[in-house]
Amino acid sequence: MSSKPIQKIIFGSPGTGKSYMIDKTIIPEELKINKPENIIKAVFHPEYTHGDFMGKLLPMTQDGQVEYNFYEGHFLKALSQAYKNILSTYDKHENKIEGKEVENVALVIDEINRGNSSAIFGSIFQLLDREEDGWSSYTTSINGVMFIKLLELLDGDFSKKNNEITHLSIPPFNSQSIMSLQQKLKFLNFDLINKTIRIPPNLSIIATMNTSDSSIYYMDSAFKRRWDWEFIDINSNLIKSGGTAFNNRSDWESFIRKLNSFIKNNHSYIRGIEDKQVGKYFIKGDVISKSVVQSKLMFFIWDSVFTRDKKPLLELLDIKDKNELITFGDFSTKIDNFIKRVESYNV
């Protein structure tokens, strides 16, 4: 299992090889995934809904009667596969099987900005915050029929009384009361009593986004913050500067204060200044690399803050010829100058 889950959006112009990078590099080399059942793919589009993502009831006709069956969406399918891979590393006595590694699962979302991401993710949005161990920081509830479908996807077998599950078996654990099984499943962070879930560390979510389509659906700042970002330029090169930008949180927070002053002082160029400033948790970690600042922070500044007019960035970087700053690719190469100029900005 990867020591840390990947949760990133790979962005750039159309035809630059974003999907190719996921299929040929990230999935087989970084995540070590080689089984098709561990790769779940979705494509967002204007008609794609939360039901497509989580699951929904659909009618079917059988013997002249209309019945409704619940079909899992891409996220629920990926989540259940990740849970199953964790469960498969334990025996029925709750002992970890020696030498058996947890297999990673990848949920791949193509064209993430061609659908209404906030509506599609819904309450799953809060699960995107991850702890250092890779688990979601928070939980979210799933409703009755979705809860039952998740149990079925885990090959669960259960009995009911008064429409409530009384006994349940989930391989490798035999049938027992919900309370007893809950105690055994603590390592899974799947709460059978309160019907809550968390994303496990062996589930990575990787998305692609065409920068030319960035205006199709608006991604709010809170949604963007929960992803790592990687930029591929027009020549299919991954723009990823080496080295460290900030060695500690104190330096980072000082930088953010100055950056926010720069943003506020240029409020006349910005629509909706309140959510265009940057919080100290926009990037987590004690040591912050240049590549993270480059792809995550600088893209946010370029795409969300100074969307309409790049004049403040030209002035900040002391660039006289505006043709030097036409695309984000141009801006991303100025990372050292960007950090230097912000750090020397007068608050």
Image: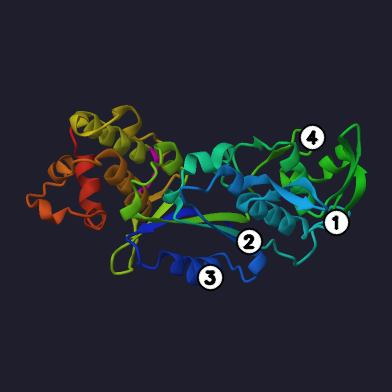
Closest to the camera, between mark 3 and mark 4, is 4
Q: How many marks?
A: 4
Measuring from the top left, give residue 34's x and y in whole percent. Answer: 62, 71
Q: Are marks 4 and 1 in contact (CB under 8 Å)?
A: no
The residue indicated by pointer 1 is 172
Q: Residue furthest left?
A: 320
Measuring from the top left, give residue 302's x and y in whole percent. Answer: 27, 46
The residue indicated by pointer 3 is 29
Q: Quadrant of residue 101?
A: bottom right
Q: Are marks 2 and 1 in contact (CB under 8 Å)?
A: no
Tell me the number on the disc at residue 193. Answer: 4
- Give the amino acid type for the residue marked by disc 2 in the picture: Asn
N-term-proximal mark, 3 vs 4: 3
- Give the amino acid type for the residue marked by disc 4 in the picture: Ile
Screen quadrant of the C terminus:
top left
Residue at 46% x, 43% y: name it. Answer: 116
Measuring from the top left, give residue 246's x and y in whole percent. Answer: 35, 47
CA gap, disc 3 to disc 2?
A: 12 Å
N-term-proximal mark, 4 vs 1: 1
Residue at 25% x, 42% y: name it. Answer: 307
Question: Dot 4: what SS?
Answer: loop
Q: Residues within 10 Å of mark 3 (few under 14, many from 20)?
A: few
CA gap, disc 4 to disc 2?
A: 27 Å
Whether 259 is drawn above or below 175: the answer is above
The residue indicated by pointer 2 is 104
Q: Which residues are magenta?
A: 245-249
- Give the amino acid type for the residue marked by disc 3 in the picture: Glu
Q: Is residue 277 magenta?
A: no
Q: Residues within 10 Å of mark 2 (few under 14, many from 20)?
A: many
